Image (spheres, rainbow, N blue to C red):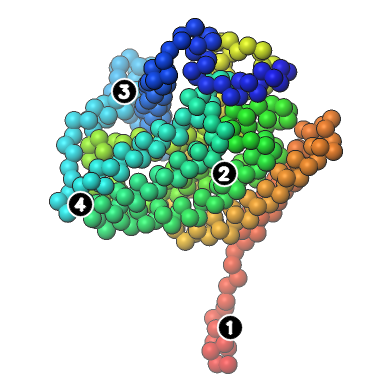
């Protein structure tokens, strides 16, 4: 394996790839405009597709048809799965044409700024996500830290939207989001510390390369970390069963109760873009990223290899997105106090145990350099056993007090 090229490629950007592959010696600002246009177009198309896909999957789970008639009629007649393909496009046009209403008692500046901030933060986080070898807008040396910091700013925009709406339901949704973040953010960060210890770098491309050098995906030695991060990521993007800030049955629509038109659409699109972001981070950190198994990395990556790596990356990302959609219709919404109890009493201790396991793998790799995958597998099995034990203890029913015991206690 050409290790020198791998480490050189890990620091490459889309700008250098365009210059080396096509000879496009473009000015820096033009390259950044191309990157921004490609990223915006990809996110918009992905969000529209994911909205349609979730509607069809939800309909199939609920044993109904779902959107059928918007789009070519022949498609709907041929297969119910591809019917209604243009439904999300029609909804987008409808939201574009709707009036932007600002409530009379609302604070207009933060009210308008909140959806802009939430979508800008989501877009900025995609800058360091490596879709393919040498195909990242910017490969920062602190890429993973940058992603965590940018994704955490979403809560600030939700708080801004809830407070500026001057609506009690919106304010409750914003406060719930803040309380929810305090519960999941610390386990999420500790879950990511394990792969950072194994890779020895915060660079997203460097983490992909480190998994290839280890011989196994980081989900094997850091099985606990992968589960913890995925659960915390569901809470981060406010997806069911952790959609507490926008619980329809309790808060109307939560922090977006007063929004309409394109401002509401920006919140809606940001939710699906964030869902793709956290699944992409999971694939990059725990499931090998763009590196294709059993295919050696060429000394000079061609366009075909880059496209194949991007396809492999997106395939794994969409699998995790489907898991999120399946979880939505499997588990009921949890109470806010239950979520905080889950984060502080269950996820955080397991995240600390996972960090110790990853440190053990890093130490044992030095003493057993011939078979690092065996060390990782053994630690991963131990982590799975600990997770099973913790789940059985967490699900154990609390002891109940019989009425006669209460009477005896009052009498004494």
Give the mark nearest the N terminus, 3 or 1.
Answer: 3
| Quadrant in which the N terminus is drawn | top right
CA–CA distance between discs 2 and 3? 34 Å
Query: Which comes sooner in the sequence, label 1 or label 4?
Result: 4
Instruction: From this view, report whether residue 386 is shown above or below residue 68.
Output: below
Mark closest to the chain's N terminus, 3 or 4: 3
- Given residues 18 and 404, the one toward you in this image is 18
What residue lies at 46% left-to-right and 31% top-to-bottom? 126
Q: Nearer the viewer, residue 259 or 65?
A: 259
Q: Is residue 6 left or right of residue 28?
A: right
Q: Which residue is mark 1?
A: 405
Residue at 26% in and 52% down: 164
Number of the front mark, 3 or 4: 4
Q: Is residue 229 above or below residue 181?
A: above
What residue is pinned by disc 2? 229
- Quadrant in the picture for the C terminus: bottom right
Q: Which residue is mark 4?
A: 106
Q: CB under 8 Å between callouts 1 and 4?
A: no
Which of the two discs, 3 and 1, sits closer to the camera?
3
**Callout 3: few (<14), some (14-19), or many (20+) C-alpha neighbours within 10 Å?**
some
Instruction: Give the labeled residue for mark 3.
Output: 86
């Amino acid at each position: 394996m050409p290790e020198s090229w791998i480490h050189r490629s890990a620091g490459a950007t889309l700008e250098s790839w365009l210059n080396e592959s096509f000879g496009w010696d473009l000015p820096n600002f033009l390259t950044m405009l191309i990157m921004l246009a490609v990223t915006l177009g990809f996110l918009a198309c992905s969000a529209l597709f994911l909205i349609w896909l979730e509607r069809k999957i939800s309909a199939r789970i609920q044993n109904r048809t779902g959107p059928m008639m918007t789009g070519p009629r022949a498609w709907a007649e041929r297969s119910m799965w591809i019917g209604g393909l243009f439904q999300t496009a029609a909804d987008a046009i409808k939201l574009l044409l709707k009036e932007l209403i600002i409530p009379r008692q609302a604070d207009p500046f933060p009210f308008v700024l909140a959806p802009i901030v939430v979508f800008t933060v989501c877009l900025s986080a995609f800058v360091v996500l490596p879709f393919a070898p040498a195909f990242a807008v910017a490969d920062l040396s602190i890429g993973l830290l940058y992603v965590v910091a940018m994704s955490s700013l979403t809560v600030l925009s939700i708080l801004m939207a809830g407070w500026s709406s001057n609506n009690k339901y919106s304010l409750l949704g914003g406060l719930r989001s803040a309380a929810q973040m305090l519960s999941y953010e610390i386990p999420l960060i500790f879950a990511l510390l394990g792969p950072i210890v194994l890779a020895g770098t915060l660079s997203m491309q460097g983490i992909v390369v480190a998994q290839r050098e280890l011989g196994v995906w980081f989900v094997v030695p850091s099985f606990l970390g992968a589960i913890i991060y995925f659960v915390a990521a569901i809470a981060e993007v406010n997806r069911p069963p952790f959609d507490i800030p926008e619980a329809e049955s309790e808060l109307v629509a939560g922090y977006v109760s007063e929004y309409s038109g394109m401002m509401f659409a920006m919140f809606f699109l940001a939710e699906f873009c964030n869902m793709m972001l956290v699944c992409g981070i999971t694939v990059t950190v725990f499931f090998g990223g763009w590196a294709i198994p059993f295919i050696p990395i060429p000394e000079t990556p061609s366009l075909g290899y880059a496209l194949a790596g991007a396809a492999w990356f997106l395939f794994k990302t969409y699998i995790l997105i489907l898991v999120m959609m399946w979880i939505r219709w499997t588990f009921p919404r949890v109470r806010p106090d239950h979520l905080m109890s889950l984060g502080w009493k269950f996820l955080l201790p397991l995240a600390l145990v996972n960090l110790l396991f990853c440190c053990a793998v890093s130490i044992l790799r030095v003493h057993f350099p011939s078979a690092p995958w065996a060390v990782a597998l053994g630690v991963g099995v131990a982590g799975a056993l600990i997770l099973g034990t913790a789940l059985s203890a967490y699900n154990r029913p609390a002891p109940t007090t019989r009425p006669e015991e209460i009477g005896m206690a009052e009498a004494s």
